[in-house]
Image: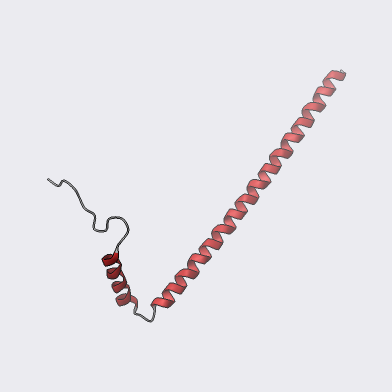
């Protein structure tokens, strides 16, 4: 019945679609509030990125601590096995 379904906005919106969206934004918010809205959006994005970077740094610190703990565990396990081997050989 229907061979193809064409989406209303295929891919990224082009010129006419952006003009319609811009017109709707101006009507909804008014020309005076658009710079304030853009500024607050930019600040929110910046805050989000700073929070994400802090979380990534904490995860890297935890991963670094785990790697150090693993290395310490392996070296202590080696020393324990060496001690037990020397104890068995002396018996």
Identify the residue at image location x=58%, y=56%: 55
Q: Quadrant of the N terminus?
A: top left
Colouring style: secondary structure
Residue 41 placement: quadrant: bottom left
Give coordinates of residue 43: x percent, y percent.
50, 70
Identify the residue at image location x=55%, y=61%: 51
Give coordinates of residue 89: x percent, y percent.
84, 18
| Direction bottom: furthest residue | 32
On screen, residue 58 above or below 50? above
Identify the residue at image location x=63%, y=46%: 63
Q: Is residue 48 left or right of residue 2?
A: right
On screen, residue 81 above or below 50? above
| Direction left: furthest residue | 1
Residue 77 placement: quadrant: top right
On screen, residue 71 above or below 64? above
Q: Quadrant of the C terminus?
A: top right
Give coordinates of residue 53: x percent, y percent.
57, 58
């Amino acid at each position: 019945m229907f061979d193809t379904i064409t989406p209303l906005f295929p891919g990224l919106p082009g010129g006419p679609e952006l003009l319609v969206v811009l017109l709707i934004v101006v009507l909804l918010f008014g020309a005076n509030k658009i710079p304030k809205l853009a500024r607050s959006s930019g600040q929110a994005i910046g805050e989000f990125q700073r929070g994400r970077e802090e979380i990534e740094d904490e995860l890297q610190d935890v991963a670094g601590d785990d790697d150090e703990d693993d290395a310490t565990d392996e070296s202590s396990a080696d020393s324990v096995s060496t001690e037990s081997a020397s104890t068995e050989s002396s018996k």
